[in-house]
Image (cartoon, rainbow, N blue to C red):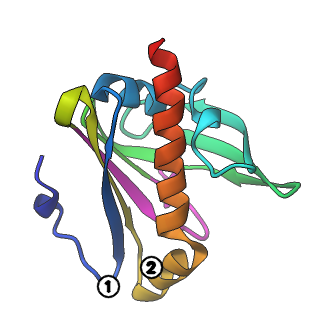
Amino acid sequence: MNLHAFDLDPQTDLSFTRSLAVPRALIWECWTEPRHIPHFFIPKPHKITAVDIDLCVGGRFNTSFDVDGHVMDNKGVYLEVVPGEKLVFTDSYTEGWKPAADPFMTAILLLQDGADGGTTYTAIARHRSPDARASHEKMGFYDGWGTVASQLETYAKGLQG
């Protein structure tokens, strides 16, 4: 899968690629099975308090976060699911294609076989405007999503046992 095929727009898109020392199938499992999401999906010490996944195009990807005692619900849908390779989800819609009042972004996760049995992991966040992109970058996109990738790798390594 070629990252350039996504025609990244530096005005509205944020992305990074990292090598994870865990097989791609396990990274896919972690991203697609609700029991795994709380272990990596938000930077610690924040917590995921609920996950509801219907892994199909138009299916729900709903999470609830506890950030410093404030619970936030994030409802979204999958736009594309390519088993083992690609997940695209957004908060622009909720299940049933109901438009969200204040959408933030669309996420694209790309997984490829990496060196030594690992995974090449690419995360892309697409925003509606340059202002939304700038806001997400200032909120800590690279640190936050980088932390999530590190937590994912550590958690998935523990599953290999």
Q: CA distance from mark 2 to mark 1?
A: 7 Å
Residue lying at 34% horizontally and 34% vertically, measured from the top left: 21
Residue 68 image-quadrant placement: bottom right
Q: Label 1: which residue? A: 11
109 with respect to 31 (left or right): left
> Does 110 lie within the magenta span?
yes
Q: In this picture, which residue range is highlighted in magenta?
A: 90-112
The x, y position of residue 112, in whole percent, is: 20, 38
Residue 27 image-quadrant placement: top left
- Residue 150 seen in render: yes
Q: Label 2: which residue? A: 133
Q: Residue furthest top?
A: 161
Residue lying at 49% horizontally and 38% vertically, measured from the top left: 152
Residue type beneath disc 2: Arg
Residue type beneath disc 1: Gln
50 with respect to 89 (left or right): right
Vertical position of residue 106 compared to residue 97: above or below? below
The x, y position of residue 64, in whole percent, is: 71, 45
Vertical position of residue 82 compared to residue 135: above or below? above
Vertical position of residue 156 compared to residue 101: above or below? above
Which of the two labelled residues, at mark 2 and mark 1, occupies the earlier sequence position? Answer: 1
The x, y position of residue 108, in whole percent, is: 34, 53
Residue lying at 16% horizontally and 69% vertically, measured from the top left: 7
